[in-house]
Amino acid sequence: MAAQKNTTKGATGKWDLLRVVLALGRGGTLSAAARTLGVDHTTVARHLESLELELAAPLFERSPLGFTPTPLGDEVLATAERMEGEVIGLLRRSEGTVSELTGLVRLTTTPFLSARLFAPALGGFLRLHPGLQVQLVGDNRTLDLSRREADVAVRMSRPQVPGLVTRRLGEMAYAFYASATDMRPFSEQMFLAYEDSSNDLAQELFLSKIVPPERIALRSNLTQVLIESARAGVGCAALPCLAGEGDALLRRVPSPRPMQSMPLWLAYHEDLRRSPRLRAITEFIQTVVSASSQALVPADFPFEA
């Protein structure tokens, strides 16, 4: 029994060291790896030194720009990634066998949808399921569901990663809005543009076709920044109708071309299909979207010349 405990402890220790190599390989610096692992950067440096001493060879080349894997480092990284995949797969499959509706469930979506659509509805969900805790991650980046960075995602483009279950939830309509006190027509407006290299480019492409670049006064990767700027009279922005309709500080500005609605997609890993937590949060998502369907896809407004 003692030998088995020592073997298990040794395997766990090796995995901890390999996790450091993974985080350093992905982050490129001690501080980035430390943030990923939730430890101090000196801990990362100490674990890396321990593993390099054991292997009697460097795993990374150090430079002012960060850490670059050596050929041996690339081999260790590939091994660590395979181990990580096995560990994460095991955790996902074990999650599917849990029958109790307790524990943490992680939902990721855009910052705007997390704040405007899902956060206000979470109170009722948590009262209905008091054993659950929710981590609501508002992030424009596409978190990796296969690596358990989140359990379920709501996105505006369909994920194409193998092993994911995807379902179309509906569509989110867009229109142009300016300050309620700004009565200028579309042709006289300055514009506020959404710009984010990590996200879908549909909004940027649409605006570039009907607005020349010299009339774009502000660009931002956050919808909330565009909303607040439009309210303050900085300019006119293409916003989700979920944000613009019913806002007394905003006025809808008829445009020469309507903007195409953006689809909403639900995604989760197929290993979680039987998880009670997963079923509960997906039912919550569908209920919230259905209840907001008229705000997400409002009635069409005719163009006013």
Image (spheres, grey):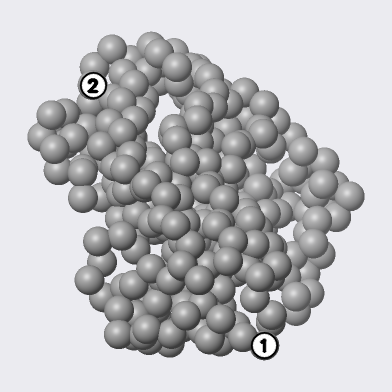
Name the element at disc 1: helix
Q: Is residue 264 above or below residue 195?
A: above
Q: CA distance from mark 1 to mark 2?
A: 54 Å
> In this figure, which residue is indicated by the disc labeled 1?
214
Q: Position of residue 281 (x, y in %)?
A: 31, 30
Q: Position of residue 31 (x, y in %)?
A: 56, 68
Answer whether residue 246 is visible to the viewer in this image. yes
Q: Residue furthest right?
A: 71
Answer whether residue 90 is visible to the viewer in this image. no
> In this figure, which residue is indicated by the disc labeled 2?
101
Q: Amino acid at mark 1?
A: Glu
Which label number is shown at residue 281?
none
Residues 70 and 180: in front is 180
Q: Residue at x 63, y 68 (%)?
A: 207
Q: Residue at x 54, y 27 (%)?
A: 166
Q: Is residue 38 above or below residue 80?
A: below
The image quarter in which residue 205 lies: bottom right
Residues 70 and 101: in front is 101
Q: Residue at x 69, y 82 (%)?
A: 213
Decide if residue 201 is on the left or right side of residue 251. right
Residues 289 and 244: in front is 244
Q: Amino acid at mark 2?
A: Leu
Q: Quadrant of the N terminus?
A: top left
Instruction: Check contact, mark 1 vs mark 2: CB within 8 A.
Output: no
Decide if residue 46 is on the left or right side of residue 295. right
Q: Residue at x 51, y 77 (%)?
A: 186
Q: Position of residue 114 (x, y in %)?
A: 35, 52
Decide if residue 38 is on the left or right side of residue 130. right
